[in-house]
Amino acid sequence: MGQRTKIKALLQSEQTNIEVTVKGWVRTFRNNQFIALNDGSTNSNIQIVVDFENTDPAILKRITTGAAISVVGQLVASLGKGQTVEVKATEIEILGDSDPEKYPLQPKKHSLEFLREIAHLRFRTNTFGAIFRVRNSLSFAVHQFFQEKGFVYLHTPIITASDAEGAGETFHVTNFDLLNPPKTEDGEIDFKQDFFGRPTNLTVSGQLEGELGAMALSDIYTFGPTFRAENSNTTRHLAEFWMIEPEMAFFDLNDNMNLAEELLKYVIRYALDKNKEDIEFLTQRLAEEEKQKPQNERSNMSLLDKLQFCLDNDFERLTYTEAIDILKESTPNKKKKFQYPVEGWGTDLQSEHERYLVEKHFKKPVILTDYPKDIKAFYMRQNEPDAHGRETVRAMDILFPGIGEIVGGSQREERLDKLEQRMDEMGIPKDELWWYLDTRRFGACPHAGFGLGFERLVLFVTGMGNIRDVIPFPRFPKNAEF
């Protein structure tokens, strides 16, 4: 048997009348003559023409939706509509049968909810084939972007004793028998006897450890799984997700914003170049979905327009304070159209406010900076109080259409006294983060970094509505299937 050729390559082939070997899964088989075969390299199927009069009827019977087959035949110019080439089969071998009575993916439209229940098979649909090829390209593009800039890819720990955000929503890692953990004399659980000799959890972020790397290697990035035990059953939250977190020595807030904007444009452009067909398919899918919605909920931009919109515009940069003034004076706020009214300075912005700024007010992606100190994390560099005595930090959030915040970052607080004071105010134990404080004791320098939730990015580029549909095996409250 010859070397297998992928269907994507065959469909682009300039040559015809050559013998080829193709393997894949049957999508449909009609009139005992035409097989639509797919191998996941593209959403397009290749048509296999079967000489049914000279094929064993027992074999024909086994060519069912979902079956895996191997075909040897001639690649010829196609007479049918919709494809330029097809394969005239000379040999067909069934590699794996699929019982049509039991196979859950019949050639019809399935709901995304149903497909989530069979996530082990949903890769075989056009929608999920497209999503995961796009996800693959975005992932590769992230690495290529940083590697071209001379960044060092650093693997930060998945098991850690620190809670970077201080939010306390962590999964515990233990080796104890949960029914009978060892206790101290006071009746507390004795973690000294646990595997690591102390309480540990799955990481919520690689940032703090990333900073340690940046203090020697200058520019590093991490790209790995992170975990939040937040009991949130929304379309925007997962318990296990991937984060891209660069940290750069000698960067200020401005350098940080420039890098984040450049990264986003780079990876979106890469996906548009590499996955043109898939993104066109997903644009079409979204347009169909939008038709089901009431007029006022429909997006005024197609998926392709939305992606182009991010490439064609310089991101608008403004401070949180300026944004609050715009939102306070906005028509939806005055007409009480916002679900969360904007009362004034100090309000934590909601997705509806972020989207108003991007989609209605500026009509371009927005970077908000200099947020109130009280609504941000302890490690962000503090600004001098403004004329009204209001305290802000050098934070930045990048806001995109349809999705709101996609990147969050800041210049980090490199001054030891200010950092310690802030940790005291927020009740963060300094003795546990002694190693983090050491970077401020020995050769501190201005530095900055940001976090980009990878699934948020994939959600944006694919136009999907639910984050559970852009990660192969979603983990969320009450679900760890597959």
Image (spheres, rainbow, N blue to C red):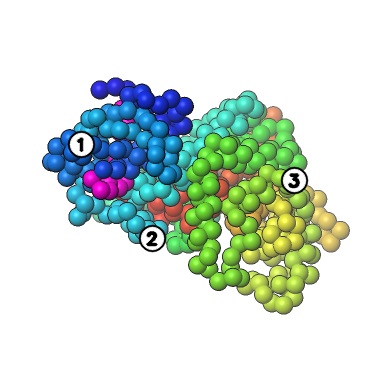
Q: CA distance from mark 2 to mark 3?
A: 37 Å
In the orientation shown, which residue stands out farthest toward the top?
Answer: 2
Give the mark nearest the N terminus, 1 or 2. Answer: 1
> What residue appears at the point 83 percent right and 56 percent down from the top-left corner?
386
Of the pair 237 and 185, the residue shown nearer to us: 237
Location of residue 187 in the rendering, given as x and y in whole percent from the top left corner:
34, 56
Of the pair 49 and 294, the residue shown nearer to us: 49
Mark 1 or 2: in front is: 1
For residue 367, side relative to residue 194 (left or right): right
Tell me whether circle 1 and circle 2 mark residues in contact (CB < 8 Å). Answer: no
Q: Which mark is residue 314?
A: 3
Of the pair 241 and 391, the residue shown nearer to us: 241
For residue 337, side relative to residue 118 (left or right): right
> What residue appears at the point 72 percent right and 62 percent down from the top-left corner?
360
Which amino acid type is shown beneath numbered disc 1? Answer: Ile
Q: Which mark is residue 111?
A: 2
For residue 92, side relative to residue 255 (left or right): left
* Secondary structure mostly taken by the magenta-highlighted segment of the chain: strand
- Which residue corresponds to mark 1? 94
- In this picture, is 197 found above or below 384? above
